[in-house]
Image (cartoon, coloured by chain):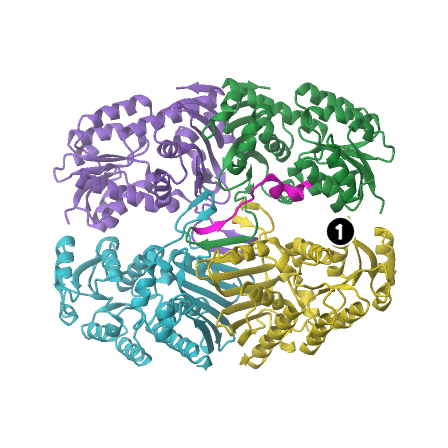
Chain colours: A yellow, B purple, C cyan, D green
Amino acid sequence: MKKIKIGIIGLGRLGMEHAKNLAFKIPNAELIAVCAIEEEIVNKIKNDWGIKYGYTKFEEMVKNTELEAVAIISPSPLHVRHIKLAYQNNLHVYVEKPLGINLAECEEAEKIVESNEKLVFSLGFMRRYDPSYAYAKELIDNGHIGEPFMVKATSIDPEHTIDGAIKFAASSGGLFLDIAVHDIDLIRWFLNDPKVSKIHAIGGSYVHQEFSKYGDGDNVASLIEFKNNKMAILHSGRNAAHGYHVETEIIGSKGSIRIGNVPQKNLVEILDNNGVIKKCSQSFQERFSEAYRLEMQDFIDCIQNKSKKPRSSVYDGTETTKIAFAATEAFQKSEIIKM
Amino acid sequence: MKKIKIGIIGLGRLGMEHAKNLAFKIPNAELIAVCAIEEEIVNKIKNDWGIKYGYTKFEEMVKNTELEAVAIISPSPLHVRHIKLAYQNNLHVYVEKPLGINLAECEEAEKIVESNEKLVFSLGFMRRYDPSYAYAKELIDNGHIGEPFMVKATSIDPEHTIDGAIKFAASSGGLFLDIAVHDIDLIRWFLNDPKVSKIHAIGGSYVHQEFSKYGDGDNVASLIEFKNNKMAILHSGRNAAHGYHVETEIIGSKGSIRIGNVPQKNLVEILDNNGVIKKCSQSFQERFSEAYRLEMQDFIDCIQNKSKKPRSSVYDGTETTKIAFAATEAFQKSEIIKM
Amino acid sequence: MKKIKIGIIGLGRLGMEHAKNLAFKIPNAELIAVCAIEEEIVNKIKNDWGIKYGYTKFEEMVKNTELEAVAIISPSPLHVRHIKLAYQNNLHVYVEKPLGINLAECEEAEKIVESNEKLVFSLGFMRRYDPSYAYAKELIDNGHIGEPFMVKATSIDPEHTIDGAIKFAASSGGLFLDIAVHDIDLIRWFLNDPKVSKIHAIGGSYVHQEFSKYGDGDNVASLIEFKNNKMAILHSGRNAAHGYHVETEIIGSKGSIRIGNVPQKNLVEILDNNGVIKKCSQSFQERFSEAYRLEMQDFIDCIQNKSKKPRSSVYDGTETTKIAFAATEAFQKSEIIKM
Amino acid sequence: MKKIKIGIIGLGRLGMEHAKNLAFKIPNAELIAVCAIEEEIVNKIKNDWGIKYGYTKFEEMVKNTELEAVAIISPSPLHVRHIKLAYQNNLHVYVEKPLGINLAECEEAEKIVESNEKLVFSLGFMRRYDPSYAYAKELIDNGHIGEPFMVKATSIDPEHTIDGAIKFAASSGGLFLDIAVHDIDLIRWFLNDPKVSKIHAIGGSYVHQEFSKYGDGDNVASLIEFKNNKMAILHSGRNAAHGYHVETEIIGSKGSIRIGNVPQKNLVEILDNNGVIKKCSQSFQERFSEAYRLEMQDFIDCIQNKSKKPRSSVYDGTETTKIAFAATEAFQKSEIIKM
């Protein structure tokens, strides 16, 4: 089996998840290079896993001519710069969301990607690869619920990670950019990429006041109207007591489909003096570990099989970012934003 | 609307439930007489509810010529005697389960009932009137699961009523006669009244040792084989932490139906730091209050409409008692009992 | 037991439900008078049920001095006029929602009610009496989910009643006034009556174009912002394939509560070649029959027990109407409406 | 990272699952040899996956001195012979269930395994590694349900695989040996390895008569009594319309735990004119793919970490086989079998 030689930049929490997948769980990939600014970590991974090359500078890694592809899990403000470097060295690119930190960056990324259509470009909206979401999409595409016209999407981080969220509040970009982008991506996917017409959003810092000083909230909601008149409701929050809650409902002319209505951890049900209980997923890693693996597997498969395309394009990145910015603006100004 | 004039004997916990239904919830019934050994209670109900007649002796109540029917909720050892008195006075009879406390009594009851086929005789297997069980029966009778060949039936009383159960242990007749009779009735109903061929039963006093000295257990299980080779599994217990658990599964050639798999109290779901929780019913009154009302309504309707028959007959009472006794014997002897 | 003598006006589908409850299911009420414009129906009910008085004019019924109370289930445009007549004759009043068909009417009703505080006035927001909603309210009032700050409320009528909805479309007032008022009432109840600050609403006629010509839709959604900054999301629709879908979620600082997430018919679960299936309620009568009975029982109890108050006041009627009109305006103008 | 060099025998459906796990999903394993009687398959795998060695005879593979371990997925009658060959060549052994095809074989296997305690021996009861079952075990070991005293275990193969089951009926050993062994293993695991005292079993060929001629059924049930008086109920079948149904309930003094009560495929819920639907797993591969991976990962980890032991021992194999034979005998003779 021919293996795609790939390098990864970024070995933080999510970077490690991707690195492990590339090193151990994707048969047709060979992780030959790892890159992070912390030399110690690079050396540790290199030695422990028997990786051929280690780097502390992405500029150097991309020059390694053995490489065919890179996975970019660097800090968000570096994404577009790293995409550019990869394209300059003729490397296929997987990049974590967000595509860029503003619209200008996203549009720059579009141009870079358009400059070489032979390279595979995959954007990390991993939910499209989650088995439950993929199953729902298939049912919908097969007409099971008729014409879908509305999506309700909820993402609430667990309360037990609130300290990290507060610490990260100043730079997170707010709930719409930080969390709701994944929901916006799903909404667009399930409704077949309609253009947004108007957005309104409200919310507040109901439990954790700390978010208000950044023009953010701990719970926000948004109404999205599309140019074809379809609609969506978003709710994003930071303090689910029961765990990591990601729930989506697609409503069609003949039925509805829900995913994650009860974000259950597994097939266990407990019957005790509290009642009948289902325990829930406690983190995005727990909920989406399979999705992360499958999207990376798909990226590698797309490199080997030219007729296959990743589920998210660079344009999905731009469009989703645009909507998230509009929602943020609607929330902060308490207005309807037209797009 | 013509109202059936009825009297009731027994004003304990369950008697009061029936009395209230007759007095207030069944439009075509008029509760004109109440009977209990405690004169004080009789007088109180008579005055509070405006009931015409009060008695402390059933022998006297049945002589009241205004009466058309009686509901017998007296202590189990008196059932057959009271049925006889009612029939001697030409009264329609509703009697709580059990029909009798041994087979001889049941057979005597059969003869009494056979002596006057014009009288309606209804036996209190109320589960047949529960909306969920009735809905399941209808689906099965319509062929939704093909030919039913197996039933799994579980009834577990809540742990919070254990003190009463222990107090009552000496006279309860044991789990099979006290609790499982309702399951045995359902099994026969769902499988269309097959005759039992063999029964085996095991179990023990796992949590509350008190039951063992009466040849009883706090959890018992039984395998029932019918002459047509269909089968059933029984499990009865006394200590469900989550509440009053009555669960039944009917397995057919084309599908299965479950009733009460999660014995949920209502349509509420709680999401808190324990997970996603459904609270459960806490007593047979809570779970089956509608069934009690509907079976009594049906009894009255059957009196008014000759072509209508109650769902349980006197023969169901005998057969169910037989099976419960056989299961008890199997458990106590640790043998297979042939019938 | 003293019985409250009551008359009812309106013997349509919902009127009959109330009439039956009053006649047969509420021990301390005596339905002594029925009124409807169709003399035939009045006579039939009078005879069949043995009701003392029959009327075709409300003006005449209220003059019956035996009466202590009336239940008004007349057409919506007559509600306030009938409340006035009842108050002029010193009668306790239960009135179906809506209180009035515009704000002026609601305010007139407030004045009538304020004119005699000794009379019990109960407004038909029956969901507050549904056992599941009442259980949820109790949990919330006991602090189980901390401080509630958000409600998501969905009401979707079943597709199989769409013909009636289309026929009624011109006069229904639209989804917000026709259906969402019940959700608005629940939102206010669960959030402890906050005042609305702003409303936005969107939607369309996605499946049944007929609604669009009346400025209505078959699915609409609204974001509601309260003056204390709490929030709510509304979704109302007309075409649920699976049945009558009423679902509510209350989100608090320490947890959430959902009611009717799966609007299941009963405790039956079917396992067949479609999967594991729960059948759903198919009409508001099926879903809320117990709520209708309990709210009428409560009305009668409040008459007998002066210290007891109905769960909905005349002011709840006005406020809910205001919000429903604002939502309708927001939807029709595609604007944010400030209140 | 040091990798354990392993070979595999058996490349059928389940063998391929294990081979793929070893080749691609277990970082610290290196699949260096594959063996099957079909040379074509061996060559294909060898080439496609870049495996170093290919064999058609297990006797030859075990002589490869690079090998440290073998995975034995050969036909059941060869298991013990292959275990012996592996031990003679000082190889760690993973063997699929069943350990042997009769008790004599199991006891021979015990002796082989006892002959070299330095070798890791892992028996393929993969359910112990399923995340849901492992989670349940942990809850139980932590005392969450008090003292467990009863297990109800159900395994029903999907109706859509019935043709294969019928074809295989003569050699399958019957439902208890073919399917219920996994449940018996779980029962013993959850109840902490009690010895069986008595077994009774009933059942029949209710839907597919073909099984009866082999002394087998399409649905069988068993009551198991342990020497410490704990108990278990088994139900095994072949024709679940909804899919692959494996459900287990462990009942303890303070609560119960269920696994797979609804054997749902994923987190999707469909709301259509059938109701609210959960689709189910359709095969053991779908349900237990993660369990297969985790048990093989654990086998490799045990080889590298001497203090770690596989969850199933050779003695579990013997004991489970004994119980399955006794259940089969009880079913065929319609007797209670004492052990």
How many callouts does the rendering have? Answer: 1
Q: Is residue D281 magenta?
A: yes
Where residue C218 sits in the image (x, y, percent)? Answer: 40, 68
The part of the chain drawn in magenta is: D275-292
- Name the residue: 17% across, 38% down: B306
Where residue D100 sits in the image (x, y, percent)? Answer: 68, 24
**In the figure, is residue D62 to the left or right of A207?**
right
- Name the residue: 58% across, 28% down: D168
Q: Residue D261: in sight, yes or no?
A: yes
Where residue A185 sits in the image (x, y, percent)? Answer: 60, 66
Q: Is residue D34 magenta?
A: no
As displayed, is residue A139 above or below residue B258?
below
Question: What amino acid is found at the position of numbered circle 1 in the picture?
Answer: Asn
**In the figure, is residue D245 to the left or right of B169?**
right
Please identify the quarter of the rendering in which residue A6 is found.
bottom right
Q: Residue A43: in sight, yes or no?
A: no
User: Of helix, strand and loop, which one carries label 1?
Assistant: loop
As displayed, is residue D85 above or below residue D295?
above
Please identify the quarter of the rendering in which residue A156 is found.
bottom right
**In the figure, is residue D280 to the left or right of C14?**
right
**In the figure, is residue A164 to the left or right of B326?**
right
Q: Which of C33 and A229 lies nearest the eye of the viewer?
A: A229
- For mark 1, does the 10 Å Cα neighbourhood hold few (<14), some (14 to 19), or many (20 or more) residues? some
Where residue A201 sits in the image (x, y, percent)? Answer: 54, 75
Provide the residue designation for mark 1: A28
| Chain at numbered mark 1 | A
